[in-house]
Amino acid sequence: MERDRTPAPAGASYSDAVVIDTPGARWVYVAGQTPRAAGPDGVPKDLGGQAERCFEQIESILSRWGATLADLVQITVYLVNLDDYASFAEVRARLVGEMPPASAAVGVASLLDDSLVEIAAVAVTASDR
């Protein structure tokens, strides 16, 4: 078994992803992603836009390891307002396709940077990708 990682942004004390290669499979564990600002438009104000940004960041991390959103096997979403779940579910359905991963939703009091959503993910691919 081999282990590697994707470093988090400078100064962070965590990894954006930890990758474990086993015979026949590569497991990519992606740290919780919030819709942190990227570019001049800043962070979207609505839950749908924030969820899309989280999935974009997850997709970017996965691509470094030869994986895509279609390889997700599990996600955990943290929502400040569980009434936003339907908006999140619409984004998830549109972005992850016809084989959705196992999923859990957790209501929380607050998230970093006043985010409305945070998403953690696990993907698995063939190790020879």
Image (cartoon, rainbow, N blue to C red):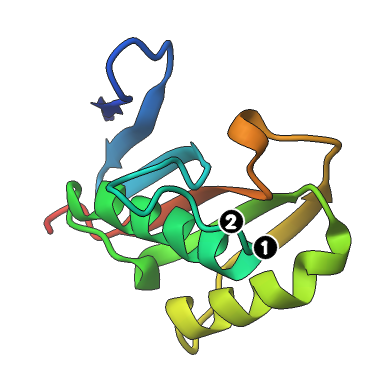
Extreme-left residue of the structure: 128
Q: Is residue 63 left or right of residue 45?
A: left
Q: In the rendered image of this protein, does residue 18 appear above or below residue 48? A: above
Residue 75's tag is 2
Q: Which residue is mark 1?
A: 103
CB under 8 Å between discs 2 and 1: yes
Residue 16 seen in render? yes
User: Picture quarter containing residue 87?
Assistant: bottom right
Q: Secondary structure at mark 1?
A: strand
Query: Where is residue 20, by image quadrant?
Result: top left
Mark 2 surroundings within 10 Å by alpha-carbon count, few (fewer than 14), some (14 through 19), many (20 or more): many
Indicate the position of residue 12 as horizontal and vertical percent values. Answer: 39, 14
Q: Residue at coordinates 37% horizontally, 24% vertically from top-left?
A: 15
Q: Residues within 10 Å of mark 1 (few under 14, many from 20)?
A: few
Query: Is residue 34 shown above or below 127?
Result: above
Q: Give the mark nearest the N terminus, 2 or 1.
A: 2
Query: If the image is split into quadrants, where does the C terminus sit?
Result: bottom left
Task: Evaluate whether residue 25 shows in this view.
Answer: no
